[in-house]
Image (tube, grey):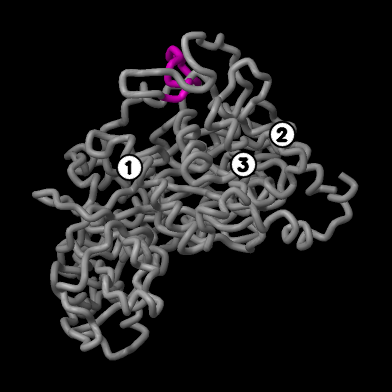
Amino acid sequence: MDYLKTVVPSQLLAERGSHLVVINAGSANIRIGLAQHDTPLNVPHCIARRTTQVPKRSVQDQLLNSQVTTAQHVERERAYDIIASLLKIRFLDEEVANVQFPQKMGRVDAFPPQGNNKKEMVIPWTDVFETSNPSSLTTGSSSTKDGSGESPVQKEGNDTGEPSSSQRKHREYICGEEALRISPNEPYCLRRPIRRGHLNISQHYSMQQVLEDLHAIWDWILIKKLHIPHGERNKYSAILVVPETFDNREIKEVLSIVLRDLCFSTAVVHQEGLAAVFGNGLSTACVVNIGAQVSSVICIEDGVTLPTTQITLRYGGEDISRCLLWTQRHHQTWPPIRTDALTKPIDLLMLNRLKESFCQIKEGEVEAAAVVHSYEDGVPPGFHKTRLTALNVPPMGLFYPMILVPDVYPPPPRSWFSDYEDMLEETWDFPRRTDGSDGYFPGSSGYFPMWDNYPIFQTRPKKEENIGLADAITKSILSTGRIDLQRKLFCSMQLIGGVALTEGLVPAVEERVLHAIPSHEAIDTVEVLQSRTNPTFVPWKGGAILGILDVTRDAWIHREDWIRNGIHIGSGRKYRDSYFLQAQSMCYINS
């Protein structure tokens, strides 16, 4: 402890962070890197596997229900008009003749623009072939030989140096952003192993496939991006920063991937909300995590999570991007092209970039001249110059989620997630079965981990609510029941996630949270604290800090113990997010 009080932070990072890999996996992106690094890699959390299925699905989930019902359409239009009234802009069906400006400038520019800066905005198609020519493998292109590496250079035209089609074969799988840029003509199917904050298990995507894809993506990043081969994994420890939405069994399956399949020597689990508090050097805060597909609110007091304050919201940045497309189409500012964010990943990639560049929250008409690209099968990208309008409406969907209309998926089998033990709380002491080995029990299809053989016990349900962000924050904080803590939390709100970078979001949150507080509550001040670093990376940074400061390592799980015993009931060893370690580490930070 004395050493921690006197050591220089950079020295501590160098000493303990070189062999700590911090993994913060989300629905759309995974943040991963060594704890000694300032920022992590931010990689799209997806994989495209080569398929021979006929008819071919370009996206694993595209056959799931995503239609907007009549009732949802009515609710969406009503929400738009509410937002328009607040922002002082024209209503949805207001006559074009009544406005003082044209709705768009320039319909379609069929030829590429002259400026190189605009050409750089084009998203190139991925080269899906690997080179099997032995001579090329010895000259540095072996990074794609396993079928998962990134193509070093996009080939254009029929270059004389390009091997013939008989010498080339498709890569077996492609990870990261390259997977999002594959043409629908190619024999690949895109998979996202995590969706809406949970493992993406459905009738179209089995548990085994989900876990295999998680392993493949993470292993590819470790080898190709962090340059940590299998033979050296036993020298590294992993810090898993998991979403609050994860259920107990999901955490255990991910732990098995890290320890059993990726071969890390030890691992520890921390929740995103708690890690975010450490990432910004706080001890008490209301953490508002606005991700790509799900948002969550949870309160932290003195470095300890308050589980009863957790609220999950089934919308995020990708829903804002799709709302941007709907808004432009309704105002007829979108070019007459086929843009499908659900079945064409490259279109969602383009919409996300437009949202990040142009969407903001402020009063008045918000417009921008932009170049929209069309990505059709087998042809080069098309350029369409247009004027986007009502760019302040989509991000307001965070407060009025009816306008977002999240895509609807059938729920996964909830019995699969039921578990007898909460990985983040005290271990329940159920008697151990006596008809099997210490860690595994025989089953009809071989041996399976011991926790599968216990009866189902109902754990605390996750709260998923269809309310706006301001209402969720207010409800979460007021649920603490203590006026002193409530006042402190309302003045210590922390926005994290990529959407937190939206211009104008902070004052919008402050204003709407203040209005959402009931008049009988003795609270008249709210404040969103400024983030010390990029809000996207705050939980990852907090996980790195927790891993470096955890000198006692009491909460760490050893690979051999996990493989042999899983969770060892009655042993006194609790594999969980240790609250006293959190408080202890916080004391080190504040000292």
Q: CA distance from mark 3 to mark 2?
A: 11 Å
- Depth check: give the residue in front, 522 or 354: 354
* Left or right of 408 in this view: 546: right
Residue placed under numbered mark 2 in the picture: 554
**Any part of residue 100 in sight:** no
Callout 1 amino acid: Met
Q: CA distance from mark 1 to mark 2?
A: 45 Å
Q: Identify the residue shown where x is 61% and y is 41%.
A: 266
* Cβ atoms at labels 3 and 2 below 8 Å apart: no
Residue placed under numbered mark 3 in the picture: 266
Q: Identify the residue shown where x is 18% and y is 84%.
A: 158
Callout 2 amino acid: Asp
Q: Residues within 10 Å of mark 2 (few under 14, many from 20)?
A: some
Provide residue 228's location: percent of width, then percent of height: 54, 59
- Depth check: give the residue in front, 475 or 243: 243
Q: Identify the residue shown where x is 49% and y is 63%.
A: 225
Provide residue 388's location: percent of width, then percent of height: 29, 69
Provide residue 312's location: percent of width, then percent of height: 46, 36
Q: Report the mark closest to the observer, 1 or 2.
A: 2
Instruction: Identify the magenta region.
Output: 448-459
Callout 3 amino acid: Thr
In the rendered image, which quarter is residue 476 located in?
top right
> Where's the N terminus, which quadrant?
top right
Q: Identify the residue shown where x is 43% and y is 57%.
A: 220
Q: Report the mark closest to the observer, 3 or 2.
A: 3
| Numbered circles on residues, count | 3
- Depth check: give the residue in front, 238 or 336: 238
Provide residue 53's location: percent of width, then percent of height: 13, 49
Secondary structure at badge 3 equals strand
Residue placed under numbered mark 1 in the picture: 402
